[in-house]
Amino acid sequence: MSHKIETIRIVDLETGYRSGSRTTVITRSVSASLYSGELTCLLGPNGAGKSTLLKTLTAFLPPIKGEIFIDNKPLSDYSDAELSKVIGVVLTEKLNLNNMSVEELVGLGRSPYTGFWGHMNGNDRQIVAEAISLVGIGNLSGRMIQTLSDGERQKVMIAKALAQETPVIFLDEPTAFLDYPSKVEIMLLLQRLAREKDKTVFLSTHDLELALQIADKIWLLDKLHGVTIGTPEDLALEGEMSRYFHRDGVVFDRERGLFKICHKMDRVVRLIGEGPRFNMVKKALARQGIEADSNLSNEIIIEVYGDSYNINGRLVKSIGSLLDAVKELI
């Protein structure tokens, strides 16, 4: 693995909007770095300023204050043409790209290099083919964009950013509108591209659980505390995850490094057993507000061994039937 390189440095950044003489500051005093070979996820509640920060880092909005350096050069010193060879951006919005094939769209990633007329040479076509292969969409290359699923379309946009051959890729909510397996697939793809191609990948997301399991670094953003940065594990152990995402009924499990729903328990049963089925029964009972433990003393006794469930001597075939039986007794 190559030594990581600081690709972006942010110094005392303030983001927001200017309208005439009025200035609205959204985030303050952000100082941080992004590195090659790392996937970094930006997390925060709605209204915290994630989109504003991302737009500022990608030069869609000017900073209110502070500096952004890319390869030690101020962002403000880059021309549009220079910036297109340094930063690739994948947005959430669905662009109207009907009547264009996958290969043609990915080929647009070469536009910073092909000039006004966009004529690709053999090298450009090879780069496009490699980007399509890396993302795993070779079977889609001849398809029209309007025939793709949301997940397939997102892969095509990532391939376009790869064909652009920039050291940095920014993505705005890349897993929005996708089903869960597609979300996982996209996040693992971005993680692999960061590592194998030594890219700096930075994305905003609401998919907290996925980010905690896949990201190399997390940026936690809110208006009160600004930005807190660290590995998912460090942020968990330091209590930052609990602080940023505290809600009634939700607790952060520091041992597992994930959030879980905290059910209100108002009934108890004695649960005896072991293994995956035992754990699933305990989870199902908790969802019903029933605390279950082998050490509890109670007239309702549930035993889970092998693939059978026994409640007060009565065998039932499924967890659903077990819950019905418990409800009859409580």
Image (cartoon, helix red, strand yellow):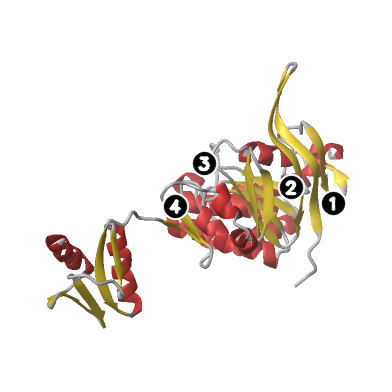
SS for dot 4: strand
Outermost residue to the bottom: 306
Which amino acid type is shown beneath numbered disc 2?
Ile
Q: CA distance from mark 2 to mark 4?
A: 37 Å
Q: Label 3 crowding class (10 Å Cα cut-off): few <14, some 14-19, many 20+?
A: few
Which amino acid type is shown beneath numbered disc 3?
Asn
Q: Label 2 crowding class (10 Å Cα cut-off): few <14, some 14-19, many 20+?
A: many
Residue topped by disc 1: 71
Residue displayed at 43% across by 53% down: 179
Q: CA distance from mark 1 to mark 4?
A: 41 Å
Query: Which numbered disc, 4 or 3, marks the residue closer to the eye?
Result: 4
Q: Earlier in the sequence, mark 2 or mark 3?
A: 2
Residue topped by disc 2: 87
Which amino acid type is shown beneath numbered disc 4?
Val
Query: Which numbered disc, 1 or 4, marks the residue closer to the eye?
Result: 4
Residue topped by disc 4: 250
Q: Is residue 310 visible?
A: yes
Q: Label 1 crowding class (10 Å Cα cut-off): few <14, some 14-19, many 20+?
A: some
SS for dot 3: loop
Q: Label 4 crowding class (10 Å Cα cut-off): few <14, some 14-19, many 20+?
A: some
Location of residue 86 in the rendering, given as x and y in whole percent from the top left corner: 78, 49
Residue 200, above or below 307 = above
Q: Earlier in the sequence, mark 2 or mark 4?
A: 2
Q: CA distance from mark 4 to mark 3?
A: 46 Å
The image's mark for residue 7 is: none
Residue topped by disc 3: 99
Quadrant in the picture for residue 239: bottom right
